[in-house]
Amino acid sequence: MRDQLNPEAGQPPALPDQRRPPHPPPHPAGPAAPLPAQPLPAQPLPAQPGPAGAAHDRVAERLAYLDSATRRINTALDLAATLRNICRVLVPTLADAAVVHLRDPLPNVEREPGFPDELRIHHSLGTRLGRRGRSTAGGEQRGSRHDGRYGPRYGARSSADTGPATPVTRGGALAHTLLSRRPAEPAVLGADGCAEGDSRATERSTELLRELYGARGVARLGAGSSVLALPLRGRKAVLGLLVLIRRPPGKTGRPAFDATDTATAAHLATQAGLAVDTALRYAREWEIANELQRSMLPLRLPQPHGVRLSQRYLPGERGAQVGGDWYDAVPLPGNRVALIVGDVMGHSLTSAAIMGQLRTSAQTLAALDLPPHEVLYHLDEQAQRLGREQHLATCVYAVYDPIANRVVLANAGHVPPVLVQPDGSAELLELDAGAPIGVGGVDFNSVELPAPPGSALLLFTDGLVETRNRPISDGLELLRARLAGAQLHAPEHLCHEALRILPPGDRGDDIALLAACFDGIPAGDVAHWYLQPRNETPGRARRLAAHTLRRWGLEELTAATELMVSELVTNAVQHATRPVTLSLVRTTRLRCEVGDDSPLLPRPRRTGPDDERGRGLQIVARCAERWGATRLGTGKVVWFEQRLP
């Protein structure tokens, strides 16, 4: 501590001038790990006068207590843990009970929050003063909503588990105490619940207690109780109020707060205010980073025919910074779908930003309908161009074809996915792991596997199977066994069962899951042709489409389908140098795809009354429910969909 007094001076420590928390020594366990410190005294600090040698010992003991208490107050970055530490260093060493009031709503400490409107109890120890709900043994409040996984939301009201809100009246005793730069004088309650003494400070203390707890609450403290109220100041504004209580001397055997106790409490209140400010700043930074990462993940997944998809994303605990896990699903021509899960190494805002760039690149490459190993190769090249530093990421890329009932996968240093067979057995796919994206000069390989209807595939990041106390190999086997014995009827059930292997406690890494249940598309609902680019091809395409629709019992769609097929095939024949493809797929909709080897995408354009060309896409847009064009690595596909009658 920079403000420790010389123990030989025989004087109590005064209120420190610094407004920055002490820098704790580095510790391998991270910022939330307990720092080495002297143990707190189990008994109240002595306050009786004595010889010079005894006074020297008392000052040394008090300085040791201040050092240990300051270290403990600053060991956590989570707000709830910080408040618990504040109360535990004060009770029972300095006080019999402690109550922490914070501004409601919790302020944005990056800006000047202005005058506080309300205070609300966020933590207490040794008393139920001001509480409406139950408390645990010892008087420590049970965790509220703000004690949860993600901490407080800025600008949000406190939950009902905390104490009732206390309005701060301008000009009142509570406002004076919050805005005062000097520590308040302790007050000793009389038999009528009023502070004893005739000074203005004593009257203000009585008014302050009644503002906070009401006359009935103050009366329950009992005559002879000593109360000390100290503001909790952050770096820019007051954040709350710390109330310390000593019960009557006849019950505890120690006197009321004196000047030495007040100076000690004021010093710890300064440290506590800075610790709360740090916790709020950390919570805000964590929420901003988490929101940034979530905004770069897909809001919802597409639901192509023949496959059902579900996803989960769980951020790491507050002690772990934001990660770079992502998932995605991209519809492809032929009712296929690309499934992607990746993990950027590291935990920082940079990892989240790199994740967003890689996800965008993966979407673009997937839309080109490149093989999985080619997608990973181009992602590897892209990662090497993302700044001067090396950015590494692992990724699994899979393409599922519901018509062929096959799945093609490629892996770049990622944990192996799990394939669940229709009979319920599960296996870890032993793919060629390769090297992570960003290493450079690595050859990736694709593997094609059968994916019959009724099977399922789970892609995930290593945060699911690797924890602080469990190696990744054990986690993978546990996951495989869990999925093998579960009844999986939906991708949501697959995600739920996978998450059940997580042990209780904090997670050091975020988790991304992407589950796909394969239903397939029956061969009888698919028609596919290769047509030579000749002048008579549009007529043949109309006849093939009409015959297929009659076979499927969709005569009502024949006229519109023939017209749109004729327009698209005519355009393809004019630009193609290789055979044109025509596909019809019947699911809950009728989908038609026309492909050729020209990379030029058709664009709707305005046509004049004398123009003979340019009306084909206008006809398609008018007759179809949806339509579009996709550029592929070897050309393009133009498609349209119609609702079944």
Image: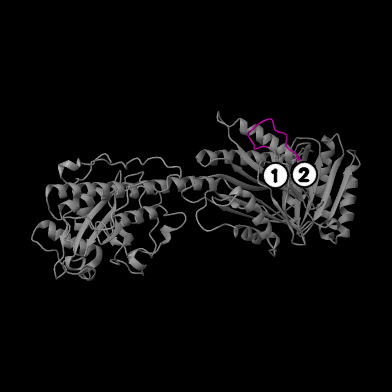
Is there a contact, CB below 8 Å, between mark 2 and mark 1? no
Left of 35 or right of it: where is 482? right
Left of 471 or right of it: where is 8? left
Question: Is 293 a magenta residue?
Answer: no
Name the residue at the top extreme. 388
Where does the C terminus fall, quadrant-wise?
bottom right
Question: Mark 2 vs mark 1: which is more N-terminal?
Answer: 1
Identify the main secondary structure in magenta.
loop
Q: Amino acid at mark 2?
A: Val
Which mark lies nearer to you, 2 or 1?
2
Q: Amino acid at mark 1?
A: Tyr
Task: Let me know if residue 309 appears in the view.
Answer: no
**In x, y percent, where is residue 91?**
28, 59
Task: Let me know if residue 486 appears in the view.
Answer: yes
Left of 494 or right of it: where is 201? left
**In x, y percent, where is residue 430?**
73, 47
Q: Nearer the viewer, residue 171 or 610?
A: 171
Q: Nearer the viewer, residue 452 or 419?
A: 419
Where does the N terminus fall, quadrant-wise?
top left
Q: How would you rate the neighbour count of disc 1 (Cα within 10 Å): few for under 14, some for 14-19, many for 20 or more?
A: many
Residue stretch rendered in magenta on the structure:
435-445
Task: Tell me the tag on residue 397.
Answer: 1
Query: Can you identify the residue that label 2 sits on?
Result: 447
